[in-house]
Image: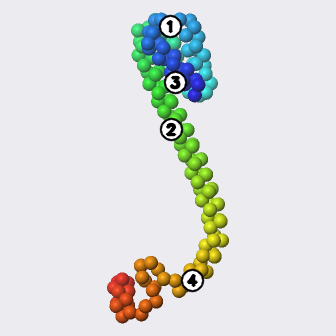
């Protein structure tokens, strides 16, 4: 992440000051960032940076376009890294929650067995069904319900 931040800062400096004001010190910094991007496997971004470096060294008019492309690639790369990080964090969180639910379920199994014996067959429900009353009307309602 530090490499991305350094590269973004360098790009912003180049955009503000201008590419023609880039000296040997900044070219050296850009080259080291290029090597770092190659090392970490960001070859597309390294290629864009190489276009910027080549444009600056050759005093090419297309170097500004190369800088804008490199900045766009950097932003996309940064967003991809963010999405991958968030995806990994969400997966870890999901696994953690599943693990906690499994712990609660295994603890709850012994409690469920105890509660089943307490709420046996003679318990009544909230909606009045199974209340134990023998009503002719309730039998007719049950037949309508089954159809």
Q: Mark 4, residues whose alpha carbon is within 10 Å: few (<14), some, or many (≥20)?
A: few
Where residue 22 sits in the image (x, y, percent)? Answer: 50, 7
Badge 3 or badge 1: first in the primary sequence = 1
**Residue placed under numbered mark 2 in the picture:** 83
Where residue 6 sits in the image (x, y, percent)? Answer: 55, 20
**Residue placed under numbered mark 3 in the picture:** 45
Foreground residue among 18 and 141: 141
Foreground residue among 129 and 29: 129
Alpha carbons under labels 4 and 3: distance apart: 68 Å
Left or right: 79, with 2 as reference point? left
Badge 2 or badge 1: first in the primary sequence = 1
Q: Could you tell me which residue is drawn at 56 percent across and 80 percent down?
A: 119
Kindly tell me whether residue 123 is visible in this rendering. yes
Where residue 146 sits in the image (x, y, percent)? Answer: 38, 84
Alpha carbons under labels 2 and 3: distance apart: 17 Å
**Residue placed under numbered mark 4 in the picture:** 120
Alpha carbons under labels 4 and 2: distance apart: 51 Å
Foreground residue among 49 and 14: 14
**Residue placed under numbered mark 1 in the picture:** 22
């Amino acid at each position: 992440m530090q490499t991305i931040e350094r590269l973004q800062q360098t790009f912003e400096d180049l955009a503000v000051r201008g590419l023609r004001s880039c000296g040997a010190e900044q070219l050296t910094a850009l080259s080291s960032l290029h090597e770092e991007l190659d090392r970490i496997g960001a070859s597309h971004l390294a290629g864009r940076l190489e276009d910027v470096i080549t444009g600056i060294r050759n005093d090419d008019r297309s170097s500004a376009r190369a800088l804008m492309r490199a900045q766009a690639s950097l932003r996309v790369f940064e967003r991809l890294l963010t999405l991958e990080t968030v995806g990994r964090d969400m997966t870890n969180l999901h696994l953690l929650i599943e693990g906690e639910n499994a712990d609660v379920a295994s603890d709850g199994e012994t409690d469920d067995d105890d509660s089943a014996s307490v709420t046996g067959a003679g318990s009544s429900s909230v909606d009045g069904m199974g209340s134990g009353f023998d009503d002719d009307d309730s039998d007719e309602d049950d037949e309508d319900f089954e159809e």
